[in-house]
């Protein structure tokens, strides 16, 4: 435990013979954490089930106050949480700080929403009867989270579950369990019962997933990850008709019309594509740019990309860090090589990239067409493929030509076109003239093969509650 940020972890969360957590910037071992096997997970699920009943029996205000105490601890320990995240995920420290603020905001939001789980009194169909609804917690939940946002992906699942009166067991990604374990430690310190919220790095991820899908006490699974794995979870959970929230893959279009504010569009492109080295589910994956502005957009975007400082995330000058591991670097490099072989061209000067570590140079690709592999694959790396379009119908056709439907972006000054694009794009989220759409106050989620369910906003609380209809007769 050489780094001071590791003080957030508890001794029982560590194990010298456990899972090695590596720093992707240099391959060094940050820490080794305890892993859980299936019999231990079964016991933890049973304990979570027992803990949820007294928790749900507390008043909404009591649950709210405990969640608020957790939020306060997250803010008090924000710098150490950010450093821990950079050590295990590689993202620049400033980005990690932003994620801590973002993740903590979900805890604050749902501490407030806990007191707003309103039912209804519905005008009755008969004079001697009354019709009403209650909202009640789903029960014991399980969550499986990815490595790209190792803190925020957890708080936006755990906070609404606890606010609703549920218990929850979280399996974090093997690459980034430290942020999750720190969240657990601070939650328990805030007064959240230990059995109510558990973080369980698994000895076998597939066996843990199978257990979540088949255990009789798990009532809901929330999963963020690939569409392929989401489909497996959906199929296995069908045997017990478990409730699901799935946030899956994306292929986000970033559409720039000739009348767009060019500076704003380029700034949005940088924020949307190169944040976390392009490793976000809502990253702009295809830049679809109208012919009249295409060359100017490419020139300005290329200059911004060439100026990126690609370094270890702890370096104060870093504006982009490494990818999560060497396998990710090889995959992204392969997509770029294939695109060039198919006729695309690299349009930017390459920033200097460290010789060792999981780094990939940021790239702008031009002459990309819809029949190229890179136009259909989720890149998950610092590569910006640019396609050219002619008119509005052409842009919509290209943008919607994908089985995915998570996020989309549009830049145009025409108010009527803004509405037409918002309505015409087949995506769960649309950002207009802005490249950053994520916020705790809005419902985050996709459609089509990008999944279903919403995180954030009042809809995020509803996803952890059942509606019970009650009829009072004989009045």
Image: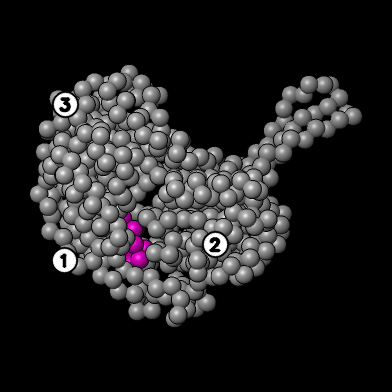
Q: Which residue is mark 1?
A: 355
Q: Residue at x 18, y 41 (%)?
A: 342
Disc with the residue nearer the chain's start (1 vs 2): 2
Q: Is residue 442 above or below residue 14?
A: above
Q: Residue at x 53, y 55 (%)?
A: 143
Q: Dot 1 lies on which element?
A: loop
Magenta residues span 85-97
Observer-side mark, 1 or 2, equals 2
* Residue 462 place in picture, x, y as percent: 59, 41
Q: Dot 2 lies on which element?
A: helix
Q: Residue at x 25, y 33 (%)?
A: 370
Q: Which mark is residue 291?
A: 3
The reply to whether callout 3 and callout 2 are in contact (CB within 8 Å) is no
Q: Which mark is residue 164?
A: none
Q: CA distance from mark 3 to mark 1?
A: 37 Å
Q: Which residue is mark 2?
A: 208
* Residue 225 place in picture, x, y as percent: 44, 51
Q: Residue furthest right?
A: 474
Observer-side mark, 3 or 2, equals 2
Residue sitting nearer the eye, 331 or 143 = 331
Is residue 365 rendered to the left or right of residue 465? left
Q: CA distance from mark 1 to mark 2?
A: 37 Å
């Amino acid at each position: 435990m050489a780094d001071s940020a590791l003080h957030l972890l508890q001794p029982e969360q560590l194990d010298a013979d456990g899972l090695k957590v590596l720093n992707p910037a240099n391959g060094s071992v940050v820490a080794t954490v305890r892993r859980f096997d299936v019999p231990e997970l079964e016991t933890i699920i049973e304990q979570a089930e027992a803990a949820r009943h007294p928790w749900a029996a507390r008043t909404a205000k009591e649950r709210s106050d405990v969640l608020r105490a957790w939020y306060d601890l997250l803010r008090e320990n924000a710098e150490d949480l950010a450093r821990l995240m950079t050590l295990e995920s590689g993202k620049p420290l400033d980005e990690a700080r932003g994620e801590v603020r973002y993740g903590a905001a979900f805890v604050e939001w749902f501490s407030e929403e806990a007191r707003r789980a309103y039912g209804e009194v519905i005008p009755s169909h008969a004079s001697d009867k009354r019709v009403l609804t209650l909202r009640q917690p789903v029960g014991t939940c399980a969550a499986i989270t990815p490595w790209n946002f190792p803190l925020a992906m957890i708080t936006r699942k755990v906070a609404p579950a606890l606010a609703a009166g549920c218990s929850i067991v979280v399996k974090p990604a093997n690459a980034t369990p430290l942020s999750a374990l720190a969240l657990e430690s601070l939650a328990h310190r805030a007064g959240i019962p230990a059995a109510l919220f558990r973080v369980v790095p698994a000895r076998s991820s597939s066996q843990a997933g199978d257990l979540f899908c088949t255990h009789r006490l798990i009532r809901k699974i929330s999963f963020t990850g690939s569409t392929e794995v989401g489909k497996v979870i959906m199929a296995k959970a069908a045997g017990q008709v478990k409730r699901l929230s799935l946030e899956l893959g994306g292929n986000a279009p970033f559409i720039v019309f000739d009348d767009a504010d060019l500076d704003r569009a380029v700034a949005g492109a940088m924020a949307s594509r190169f944040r976390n080295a392009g490793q976000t589910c809502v990253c702009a994956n295809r830049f679809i740019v109208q012919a009249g502005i295409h060359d100017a957009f490419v020139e300005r975007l290329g200059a911004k990309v060439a100026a990126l400082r690609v370094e270890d995330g702890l370096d104060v000058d870093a504006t982009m860090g490494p990818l999560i591991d060497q396998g990710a670097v090889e995959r992204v490099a392969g997509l770029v090589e294939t695109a060039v072989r198919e006729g695309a061209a690299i349009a930017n000067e390459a920033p200097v990239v460290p010789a060792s570590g999981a780094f990939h140079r940021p790239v702008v690709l031009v002459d990309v067409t819809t029949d190229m592999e890179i136009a259909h694959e989720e890149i998950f790396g610092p590569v910006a493929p640019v396609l050219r379009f002619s008119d509005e119908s052409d842009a919509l056709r290209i943008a919607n030509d994908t089985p995915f439907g998570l996020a989309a972006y549009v830049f145009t000054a025409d108010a009527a076109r803004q509405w037409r694009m918002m309505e015409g794009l087949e995506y769960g989220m649309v950002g207009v003239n802005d490249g950053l759409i994520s916020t705790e106050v809005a419902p985050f989620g996709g459609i089509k093969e990008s999944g279903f369910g919403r995180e954030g906003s009042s809809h995020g609380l509803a996803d952890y509650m059942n509606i019970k209809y009650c009829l009072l007769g004989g009045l």
